[in-house]
Image (spheres, coloured by chain):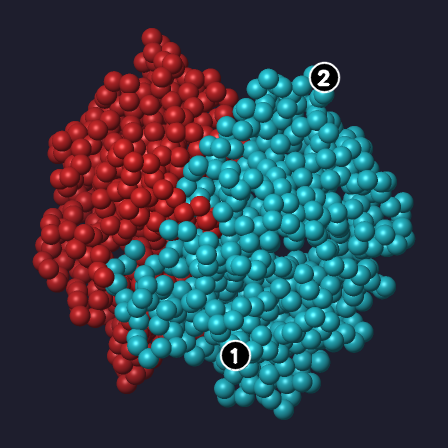
Chain colours: A red, B cyan
Amino acid sequence: MSETATTAAATPLTFETEPRRYKHWRLDIDGATARLVWDVKEGEPLRPGYALKLNSYDLGVDIELADAIERLRFEHPEVRVVVLTSGKDRVFSAGANIHMLASSSHTFKVNFCKYTNETRLAMEDASAHSGLRFLAACNGIAAGGGYELALACDEILLVDDGNSAVSLPEVPLLGVLPGTGGLTRVVDKRRVRRDHADIFCTLAEGVKGQRAVDWRLVDAVAPKSRFDAAVKERAAALAAADRGPQAPPRRGPGVALPPLEPDVAKDLWAYSTLGVAFDRKARTATVTLKGPDGPPPEDAAAAHRLGANLWMLRLSRELSDALCRLRFNEPEVGLLAIKTLGNVDAVLKHDARMAALAQTDWYAREVVLHFARTLRRLDVTARSLFALVEPGSCFAGSLLETALAADRTYALDDSARQVEMALSPLNFGLLPMGHGLTRLEARLLSRPADHASLRGRTQAGETPKFDAPAALAAGLVTVAADDIDYADEVRVAMEERASLSPDALTGMEASLRFPGNETPETKIFGRLSAWQNWIFQRPNAVGEHGALKCYGRPERPSFDWTRT
Amino acid sequence: MSETATTAAATPLTFETEPRRYKHWRLDIDGATARLVWDVKEGEPLRPGYALKLNSYDLGVDIELADAIERLRFEHPEVRVVVLTSGKDRVFSAGANIHMLASSSHTFKVNFCKYTNETRLAMEDASAHSGLRFLAACNGIAAGGGYELALACDEILLVDDGNSAVSLPEVPLLGVLPGTGGLTRVVDKRRVRRDHADIFCTLAEGVKGQRAVDWRLVDAVAPKSRFDAAVKERAAALAAADRGPQAPPRRGPGVALPPLEPDVAKDLWAYSTLGVAFDRKARTATVTLKGPDGPPPEDAAAAHRLGANLWMLRLSRELSDALCRLRFNEPEVGLLAIKTLGNVDAVLKHDARMAALAQTDWYAREVVLHFARTLRRLDVTARSLFALVEPGSCFAGSLLETALAADRTYALDDSARQVEMALSPLNFGLLPMGHGLTRLEARLLSRPADHASLRGRTQAGETPKFDAPAALAAGLVTVAADDIDYADEVRVAMEERASLSPDALTGMEASLRFPGNETPETKIFGRLSAWQNWIFQRPNAVGEHGALKCYGRPERPSFDWTRT
């Protein structure tokens, strides 16, 4: 009954690329304006078996998009506006490739949607925090995932040529939901009236022209003859618009992002700042994060000189890469044990410096924002996370966040070799979860006074430190066990965890990890994705006569009409 | 491929009962304190095929609970505290009956969970709005749904006898989620730390004694010898506690709730204030709500004299009953067309009077609160809702809410027989959706100034009225069509809607209906339920070797370990 055959491919997926290697996108930069042009190569799908017609996309196309967004933030700080458009005539994008979806395993579909959602959220993150503005220049039809990509932009301009429409045809054509945040963004972000949204989401041909403007589906339309001029106009306006006082000015030169080049063997992945060691029989992996091996950069200039070798960025890029590989290539690994290795004070020094530099230097700020995104990627990774706090570890500040992201934390309480955990300014707002709270706030939801006290001490320049008993009392660890019990307790807990239904754990963890607040981001991952997962399992979508399976065939889908 | 055979039973389910007919509960009232004692009759399941051992429950048990909660609000206004306890020794409740779940269709399971969730939310609604306080006196083990019922109470007292624990064993034992809000209430309502919640929700045997208090899973424990005294003490304290200034005092005599006695024929259900007419070939039903046929009660005394004959309460009870029957007995009816019949001004007069009386009279307030719950039941009903505004209709105030709850609204724009819609004070806060916004706020999310203006006019004593074109302009209707086009437009829209995948529509509607805010209630229906629906479909739960299917058999479940 294993899906592994179709899920974990013979050739593991990789997630790194660079503009020179792009097959499907072009990134042209002209001063403050970048043009990100998709022109998907029909004959170059990530796997054989389907053609990427009409700018439809698969994971390979999205990996390039994610790379471009990231490079814009680091390598091109002078860019203030990204015009996202299509290199094809009359079509912006037909969305995620249906034949790819129909021939993929359930697990792949779910992870594909998660990855594409993260890419779109990264665009909105760049807009919110880096002053980048995205203009979707829809020079042709934008259907399904094509329109959802436009929805992730700040503005949508649609050509008014009597033919080009925006649409979410998933429900009427495929019997599934738009999988990349479309439903949430339509009503929550663009505030399309819910009855209009209801019509729109059930209308295969979509909405075009003035009605698309009236219904708030796009911001403006322009006739074909004026489209390029209108794009230029809006791009210029977005470039010139005030970004408010808070962000440090972004200016060149940028910081290059070289390849990570991990050494990925079957049972051990070695990155420069972390390792992933597999115990395949136990279906677990141990992720060991290494603290900094030197002092932090002295000032902004030093940080820029270090470039991508800056510890926090290396760690963040490498952890993000490892999480993507784990999701797609190691679907049967159900539990990640998170360890750290290094010096607590070294982490605290880096954190303090980065928090200070992030106030005034765009690059330091980008590094912290990158790590925040990586931590959110960890939060929505559907694997059980146990943090293990052992002698020699450095769960402090930024690295403590990985323990606070974990479902449980076990600490070894050995008075002879006592562990040390610590808080830094980075635990108090710069690394928020998707629902807007910090991990420490979420952890201490029932103890707001304790949280306020820790924040006050940290703001006063202290770095509160905790040995195992103190961390237990403060709520930073779940279990503190002495050296007689620790190893057995952790082993039994991991064995028990790995024996439980992986589906039930996914639903449970998605529910328990986000107490309190909700945001569109958590609506997308918690609500929309859960509905989509359900629908992706239903015979009405994926059965022999389901709508997704029938798409493109002459036969009509056949439904069980029972409403659930 | 139809599930209907197991979903819609040969004998349709009914949802009415009364204390004298209870099989599983006893309701004893002593002054301000009610004791609601469950003592489930093992041999009296709703359907043959399973035994309700250890106070485990099925829909029949929950229907009685819902009835008791409702009668406490209307028939026993003097009650201030409800002690919920078990009549069995050493067991509070073992939760939802597993053999019932394992032998039920997917659709039944989902609707069962929805109904039980509504009952628990009704308890919290009674606490929030009617000053009723619920004390779960767990005199024995409270497992799964048993503990979830305790979670819906204001306080939980657990006997400390070395054996009695609270637990959510669904994940470890059954491979599914706790289905009645448990995960959300544990971390959101009780603010159990999420790592403690993680251990708790994977620990089949649960947590007992002082640890249950330390982890906030219960409020207090008491040894067996002191348990009854402790219950009395806490009940007395809850009875005496200040309820704040806002609620009108609740005092006797109560208002009796007689049986509804609808005339339910196969294709036409006739209630006193509404009718449901089926078009089975089209898989649609038309729900016609009748406006009041007389003036509103002059004052509180008159309202009390009318009792359950008060129009708004009759309508609310009947609509609620019809929705339950539709969900369980008519699973293939995919679309409800909502019509109204009556006089706009009569509705407005009733609304104005009820809004005024609800400030000072407990019964009027209970009627409005009941209607608010019924409308929320409509909001989470997994059927497409189209409101049809035609001459002779009375979509005003309270009845307009049913149109605002609809996915779309079609109005006939015929100058010779113009329709009339209107706003009343009830559209501005007394009938909120589950996510805390009014339906008008949710509808006008992109036009807050227009909403504020309508609210201002209504607060100033106006009753803004709209013919079809004005309603279209104000955003109250989706489509206004003239008498040449109307019938065809509605017919085509209904046919198209009824042709779409029912699963995709359920997920889409659940997403589009709740723009903006989120609350624990919408987390339960939108997030938790969606995950549960997904898990309920997965082979790891319901396959031949799934955990839910294997429960109680000698064999161990066998899992596909792929993490999704």
Q: Which residue is rendered at x = 26% and y = 23% of the image? A: A86
Q: Is residue A410 left or right of residue B406?
A: left
Task: Look at the image and tell me in which quarter the N terminus of chain A lies.
Answer: bottom left
Q: Is residue B186 above or below residue B537?
A: below
- Total numbered badges shown on the rendered structure: 2
Label 1 chain ID: B
Q: CA distance from mark 2 to mark 1?
A: 64 Å
Residue at image coords 44%, 46%: A561
**Front-lying residue, B505 or A434:** B505
Q: Is residue A292 above or below residue A221?
A: below
Q: Amino acid at mark 2?
A: Ala
Which secondary structure lies at badge 1?
Answer: helix
Badge 2: chain ID: B
Residue B135 makes an appearance in the image: yes
Q: Position of residue B487 (x, y in %)?
A: 58, 25
Identify the element where label 2 is drawn. helix
Q: Nearer the viewer, residue A214 or A548?
A: A548
Residue at 36% x, 34% y is: A173
Which disc is residue B53 wearing?
A: 1
Task: Tell me: residue B556, above or below residue A458.
Answer: below
Q: Is residue A323 above or below residue A227?
A: below
Under mark 1, the amino acid is Lys
Q: Which residue is disc 2 drawn over?
A: B416
| Upstream in sequence: badge 2 or badge 1 | 1
Q: Tell me where residue A410 appears, x and y as whole percent.
A: 33, 72
Task: Identify which residue, A307 or B407, lies in the foreground.
Answer: B407
Whole-percent x and y of residue B285?
58, 41
- Residue B115 left/right relative to A523: right
Q: Position of residue B98 (x, y in %)?
A: 45, 71
> Residue visible at 26% across and 63% down?
B560
Compared across the picture, whether B391 is left or right of A204 comes to: right
